[in-house]
Image: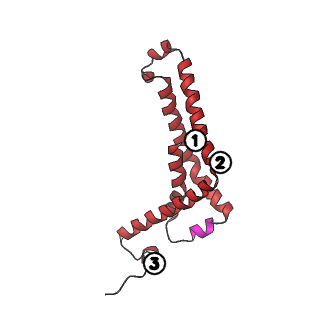
Amino acid sequence: MERPHPFAAIKGGADKRSDSMNGVRILGAFLRRDWVEARSYRLAFVLQFVSLFFNLTLFFFLGRLVDRADLDSDPLLDHGYFSFVIVGTVLVQIVSFCLAIFSTNVVNEQKAGSLEALLATPPSSALLILGGATFDFIRMLLT
């Protein structure tokens, strides 16, 4: 029995299952690369969580200042101002992230000089752009 070529999945000569596994490996490679880069900037990583704590504290105490009588008349604010602001802030972050991350990643890859090399590889451009945004999306959800 003849063994397949080790790069058959990359060259496109494989079945659908190995293509999807190849996509998972590519996303994993992007996650590892971006994790190593984020870990090298430790202060920025820590300050992101300090900023999250500061913003939550600010909105918590702001919610306590808001007049409770006005909140009781609005059905959207049944659970209080703080939960309303948190949900709104998360939605605004997700929308703004989705609008900006892909173009930002393309520009960053271009500045690093790796855009042409990435686009010349066999995986689809959509997979490469999605892979570049995966770590940032996970980090945005955590903070």
Relative image position of residue 61 (x, y in whole percent): 56, 23
Give me the residue at 62% from left, 65% from top. Answer: 115
Nearer the camera: disc 2 or disc 3: 2
SS at mark 3 in the image: loop
Q: Name the N-terminal-most of marks 2 and 3.
A: 3
Give me the residue at 43% from left, 79% from top. Answer: 6
Viewer-proximal residue among 100 and 46: 46
Q: Which mark is residue 43?
A: 2
Spatial CA distance of label 3 from label 1 is 41 Å
- Residue type of the residue flagged with mark 2: Leu
Crowd band around label 2 with a 10 angstrom C-alpha radius: few (<14), some (14–19), many (20+): few
- Residue type of the residue flagged with mark 1: Phe
Viewer-proximal residue among 68 and 76: 68
Q: Name the N-terminal-most of marks 1 and 2.
A: 2
Spatial CA distance of label 2 from label 3 is 40 Å
Q: Is residue 20 above or below residue 139?
A: below
Magenta residues, as a range? 113-119
Nearer the camera: disc 3 or disc 1: 1
From this viewpoint, which residue is outermost toward the left? 1
Assess whether mark 2 and mark 1 are in contact (beta carbons under 8 angstroms). Answer: no
Task: Decide if residue 143 is on the left or right side of residue 112.
Answer: left
Q: Which mark is residue 49?
A: 1
Circle 3 is placed at which residue position?
A: 7
Query: Colour scheme of this structure image?
Result: secondary structure
From this viewpoint, which residue is outermost toward the top? 69
Q: Name the quadrant of the N terminus.
A: bottom left
